[in-house]
Amino acid sequence: MTTKSAAAAARATVYGYPRQGRNRELKKAVEGYWKGRVTADALRATAAELRRTNWLRLADAGIDEVPTGDFSYYDHVLDTTAMVGAIPERHRSAVTRDALDGYFAMARGTQEVAPLEMTKWFDTNYHYLVPELGPDTAFTADSAKQVGELKEALALGLTARPVLVGPVTYLLLAKPAPGVPADFDPLTLLDRLLPVYAEVLADLRAAGAEWVQLDEPALVQDRTPAELNAAERAYRDLGGLADRPKLLVASYFDRLGDALPMLAKAPVDGLALDFTGAAAANLDTLASVGGLPGKRLVAGVVNGRNVWVNDLAASLSTLGTLLGLADRVDVSASCSLLHVPLDTAAERDIEPQILRWLAFAEQKTAEVVTLARGLARGTDAIAADLAANRADLASRAHSPITRDPAVRARASAVTETDARRSQPYSERAAAQRAHLRLPLLPTTTIGSFPQTGDLRTARADLRAGRIDTAGYEERIRAEIQEVISFQEKTGIDVLVHGEPERNDMVQYFAEQLTGYLTTRHGWVQSYGTRYVRPPILAGDISRPEPMTVRWTTYAQSLTSRPVKGLLTGPVTMLAWSFVRDDQPLADTARQVALALRDEVNDLEAASTSVIQVDEPALRETLPLRGDDRAGYLDWATEAFRLTTSGVRPQTQIHTHMCYAEFGDIVQAIDDLDADVISLEAARSHMQVARELAAHGYPREAGPGVYDIHSPRVPSTDEAAELLRTGLRAIPAERLWVNPDCGLKTRAWPETRASLEHLVAAARTVRDELSRS
């Protein structure tokens, strides 16, 4: 039984919802707008209909308070930049001329103007646009988006809560603008920013907002006393405003630690806290500070980042404990549901037994509503739900799908020697130079080439039975021939086959490994209009047969230049999947590494001399708290070495990373013991090259000179200047020339031009070096 006050308090809410629509209508409308096929009014109408559909779906499911402001054409941090008027000077004229076009110019750049830097949102695979700030930044409030979306929801008769990126997190995510000294601290602008937030809050209050949520996930990271003091000052000032709605400060992804007592005492009206995974520690901390007397607590007890059904009984137990720690307890997912697919009901290819184990956004919403009802009315009110949930959990726990004794025995037999190359790097490097005979500043690409409409159509036709396997493979062979021919004519030194057969760098491998499930409609936003379908890691992993050897060797047969074998590394295979939560990640990583090791060895046996094992997620998966990082990096780097250490010294092992803060993991990059690493560097102006140099990184590296997440074509001079910047940090004999990332999302015309300029830049700088 629950008390009357508990019943009154227990309401259901969420922080955010997938934006794309059931059929990715937003992606299609935005890309249509970029291509001139969709008008601005039509784009806005599509967006409004998607918001309306989401809110009504949430309300129909039983959500008592819907979020507004979480919808975005591209990125919610970029929306915040627009809200506070922190438009970079180079984009001001475009934003003034046309706000929508200027917004997309900041996100994607134009031929004339570079975009904002892009990096990962904490430890997720979602990318945000990094604010650029400096001592001269002047903030101005523009609450039109937030107010407009609130009014849309209120007009539907819904209780709505605007959700904003909090001011402290916004500044902690920002970087010094180009030309501003690198030691400038954006947090020094807090006193200048807070009045702008006060104005936005007043506008939202006037528009009918009772509550506004301010997201401060940056506070779950290790923060200095000065940063915590700044947060305390921010919420003292905002909480003390006379004309404001009630303030709900939210955090997620990890435990708050020292920030929780500060927020508990702040003059705000409630906290929204994550109680899943490592963030479960928030419960003990909250109890130790005496709870939140007189305040609202929104309890995130349904994991918003995985796809496994919630343990309803365990969550109810947590909620019951929390009832005594706040004036009112509401139920929510742990974070925005942006990070999971929309609905399991769309999945027709997953066995019904296994589908019972899964919960996407719609199912998680239902779990939140069920828990709120159980908290308010007692367990008898949800007895049938609890019984069904127990059966689902038991079905998964006892399923033979989840365990393979042979895989577990092999993983247990791994020794430290298995994860070490047979010779040190200096000896390997000499053997590789003699074998490959590459020029100074060798050029290459990361792996993928444009996935054209024809390729996607061929893949769809194969699935639908409109063409047979032979017809599909003929199309793949033709594409590989074109890619190899283009690279040879352009003068690229180490070639790739272009990956035309691959739908996604993780899903492609997941479809060929045991233990993985893949979806048809499980789309999740990665950045902008880029959506991926993360596979689901449900059981033990093995590789029944070679996955990449056939197409790699075919490409090599077309050229005398080396063609890279291309694999996705074990950490990224985990990070960009929904991983199992019933065993340690380290155990799963070792299983994946052993499966990939077999593939690496088969590639080498097929005379592949250069093998690239991509690990773009190594930094992304780094725990948010420093105390947790050493253990993670130990097993993560071991998994990479286990994948790659079975080859001969003359086989050159590459890895690739992109769109992350690499400075935090330079030692781990070193510990991978790869022979060559390529990294994103164009948008960050070669920052990573300087970080590698400061560390004394001894191996070869290719900091990117071509930003592939923008449609603009860098000139030869621009690429050459970036190369010269890279040479100030990395010696010429260890510097490679490459794009930031794969070219899958780019069109052929811009790809051709950009790579031609890249090769020309390498030749220009080689000539300069020969004359010096």
Image: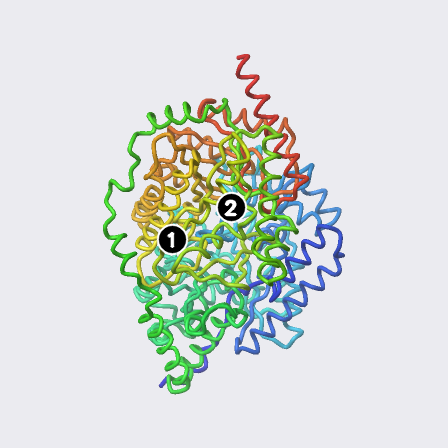
Residue 373 position by quadrant: bottom left
The residue at 59%/39% (across/down) is 481
Left or right placement of residue 517 versus residue 420 in this view? right
Residue at the farthest front position: 470
At label 2, the amino acid type is Thr
Residue 525 screen position, x and y as percent: 55, 57
Disc 2 vs disc 1: Cβ atoms closer than 8 Å?
no
Residue 412 is situated, as x and y percent measured from the top left of the image, at 24, 53
Q: Residues within 10 Å of mark 1 (few under 14, many from 20)?
A: many
Q: How many marks?
A: 2
Of residues 550 and 747, which is closer to you in this image? 550
Which residue was labeled with disc 2? 119
Residue 190 locus on image (x, y percent): 52, 48
The numbered mark at residue 49 is none
First along the sequence among labels 2 and 1 = 2
Instruction: Tell me which amino acid carries mark 1.
Output: Arg
Pick whichever, 471 or 352, lies toward us.
Answer: 471
Taking 53 as reference, is 664 left or right? left
In this rendering, does residue 117 appear at all? no
Residue tagged by mark 1? 543
The residue tagged with tag 1: helix, strand or loop?
Answer: loop
